[in-house]
């Protein structure tokens, strides 16, 4: 409609005002269609500082081939009542806000008054009046409709402003309902023999998270997360962490609500992204993990190991700082320092970073120094090179990979042993098409005991995995996934005494189908199979079946 009336007449001072009115009415209709929530309303009402231009060539985004170029050129150079944005753009395809309309109309009316005061010729020709009459007749029905829509928009605006949750904060929620069961014999560690069959019952459990996201500048974000759940880790029944689900809560609280995560992220221009974690720091939420279809605990893999490389489990659950250089560029660099929480059964010492006692605090307790170089040169191929150095102060049973992999790999030196580890990883994603993606990772860890009975000994630990995602399989938004790999396993080092190595490798096989019921509901049936649990071929294969339903809002 806007293009049609530009071609009806040559611009004159009086017609300028009419043109602005018609254009604003048309754009107001578009805004009226789009504004459905507080976020849209805020965007629709955004009023940026604009500055007057003297030539249409000053607009970097306006080209002579644009259909409205001549009209803009006339308004700018003949009447001087068109303003641009401070960055030199006009944003011709952007919806006009009421504030911008008022400012533009006022500028044009002032210019008309100046012309009236200084002109010696006829101000309004018969041709102008005829043009205005044709405009009024042609658009009378549309303008009447638009006036009704504007009135509706104003009423809706008032209602949204009166009932909005917050001008700076939005609430994002997620609820998981899960039915699962485990089958097989209970696993024995290392080279032992199983002592009994699994005594597992089918369970129905849940996990609920409510996130409060606040922004004060538009590019920063304060996250406060509330969590409740009762999903018990199944390792106490199966005898191995290798069967753990990716969405169990670790320490269930019988659905009591706790604040389990607090952090704040902000930018220095577009070149640096900084994130400060106060509690429950998790590297895999701060950096790219190169497993896009399966990284999420709520909508990704069903297993703990299938989500991403165990190297991202370093420095978990504490506080720290993560800095990413060039976060949106093809090559980015991330550095982090995280101080872990410890847990030796003593509540006083269960929170390392905020405990001033011995072997605690930000720098004297468990901590991780992390770095990652990411290459995202195109959508088809992304790769990451990762390093982490972790120190565990011996406040608790060592847990090198936060209960991911065999028991021996997580704690090769025994309880209360000060341990240092160097962790190296490579990760990659290959997207052969929009519907077919292959991801994988491999990692190596060398761990050294500093104190305890094994002081001076070391352990070599390896792991790898690959995942296949078939997107839109059986319907838009559905994903068929397969994950196969070898969880962390001790393969060498001076820690060996007799047959203490993880002698026969465990293999992890996982199949799942993410079925998208709607934009807010996903149902995921899945089966997890662990061959040689705990890297012990005396153990029979274990199976874990799940049916996970995720609600997001």
Image (tube, grey):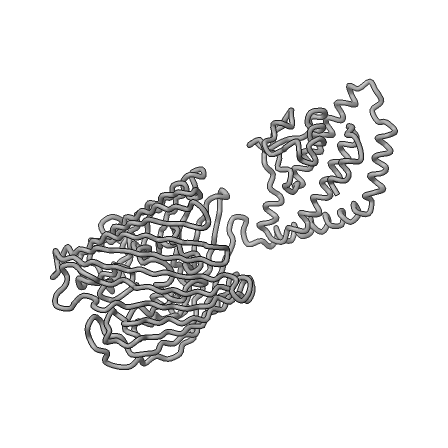
Residue 281 rendering spot, x and y as whole percentages: 35, 54
User: Which quadrant of the view contains residue 128?
Assistant: top right
Q: How many marks?
A: 0
Name the residue: 30% across, 64% down: 486
- Which x, y percent locates residue 498? 12, 68
Report whether residue 182 is seen: yes
Q: Nearer the viewer, residue 504 or 359?
A: 504
Q: Whole-percent x and y of residue 521?
A: 53, 65
Quarter of image, res 261? bottom left
Quarter of the image for the N terminus: give it.
top right
Front residue of 311/47: it is: 311
Task: Inspect this view and state whether residue 357 appears.
Answer: no
Residue 454 pos. (x, y %) = 12, 60
Q: Residue at x 34, y 65 (%)?
A: 250
**Relative vertical location of residue 116 with respect to residue 439 in this rendering, above or below:** above
- Indicate left or right for 227 with 72 as reference: left
Q: Nearer the viewer, residue 102 or 268?
A: 268
Name the residue at the front extreme. Answer: 432
Residue nearest the viewer, comparing 283 with 432: 432
> Which corner quadrant of the image does residue 547 belong to?
bottom left
Residue 100 falls left or right of residue 515 = right
Q: For the point 31% across and 60% down, which residue is it?
A: 464
């Amino acid at each position: 409609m806007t293009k049609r009336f530009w071609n009806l007449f040559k611009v004159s001072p009086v017609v300028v005002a009419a043109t602005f009115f018609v254009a604003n009415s048309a754009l107001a209709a578009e805004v009226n269609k789009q504004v459905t929530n507080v976020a849209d309303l805020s965007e629709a009402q955004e009023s940026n500082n604009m500055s007057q231009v003297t030539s249409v060539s000053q607009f970097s985004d306006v080209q002579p081939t644009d259909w409205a170029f001549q009209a803009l050129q006339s308004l700018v150079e003949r009447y001087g009542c068109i303003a641009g944005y401070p960055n030199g753009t006009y944003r011709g395809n952007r919806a006009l806000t009421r504030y911008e309309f008022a400012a533009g109309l006022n500028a044009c009316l002032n210019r008309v008054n100046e012309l009236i005061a200084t002109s010696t010729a006829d101000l309004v020709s018969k041709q102008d009046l005829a043009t205005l009459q044709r405009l009024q007749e042609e658009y009378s029905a549309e303008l009447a409709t638009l006036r009704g829509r504007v009135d509706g928009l104003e009423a809706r605006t008032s209602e949204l402003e009166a009932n909005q949750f917050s001008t700076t904060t939005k609430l994002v929620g997620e609820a998981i309902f899960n039915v699962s069961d485990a089958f097989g014999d209970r696993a024995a560690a290392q080279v032992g023999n199983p002592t009994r069959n699994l005594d597992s019952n089918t369970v129905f459990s849940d996990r609920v998270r409510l996130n409060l996201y606040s922004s004060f500048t538009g590019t920063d974000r304060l996250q406060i997360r509330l969590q409740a759940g009762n999903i018990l880790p199944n390792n106490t029944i199966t005898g191995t962490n290798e069967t753990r689900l990716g969405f169990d809560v670790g320490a269930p609280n019988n659905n009591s609500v706790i604040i389990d995560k607090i952090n704040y992220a902000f930018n220095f221009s577009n070149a640096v992204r900084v994130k400060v974690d106060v509690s429950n720091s998790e590297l895999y939420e701060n950096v790219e993990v190169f497993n896009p279809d399966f990284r999420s605990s709520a909508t990704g893999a069903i297993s703990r190991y299938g989500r991403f490389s165990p190297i991202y489990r370093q420095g978990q659950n504490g506080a720290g700082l993560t800095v990413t250089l060039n976060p949106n560029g093809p090559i980015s660099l991330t550095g982090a320092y995280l101080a872990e929480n410890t847990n030796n059964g003593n509540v006083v010492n269960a929170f390392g970073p905020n405990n001033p006692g011995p072997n605690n605090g930000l720098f004297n307790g468990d901590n991780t120094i992390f770095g990652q170089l990411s290459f995202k040169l195109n959508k088809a191929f992304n790769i990451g090179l990762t390093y982490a150095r972790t120190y565990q102060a011996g406040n608790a049973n060592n847990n090198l990979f936060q209960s991911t992999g065999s028991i021996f790999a997580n704690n090769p030196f025994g309880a209360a042993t000060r341990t240092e580890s160097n962790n190296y990883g490579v990760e990659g994603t290959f997207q052969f098409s929009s519907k077919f993606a292959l991801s994988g990772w491999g990692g190596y860890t060398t761990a050294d005991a500093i104190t305890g009975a094994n002081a001076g000994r070391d352990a070599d630990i390896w792991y790898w995995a690959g995942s296949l995602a078939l997107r839109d399989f059986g319907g838009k938004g559905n994903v068929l996934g397969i994950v196969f790999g070898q969880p962390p396993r001790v393969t060498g080092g001076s820690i060996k005494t007799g047959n203490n190595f993880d002698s026969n490798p465990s293999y992890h096989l996982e199949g799942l189908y993410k079925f998208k019921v709607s934009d807010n509901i996903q149902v995921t049936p899945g089966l997890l199979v662990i061959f040689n649990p705990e890297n012990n071929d005396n153990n029979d294969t274990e199976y874990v079946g799940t049916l996970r339903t995720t609600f997001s809002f």
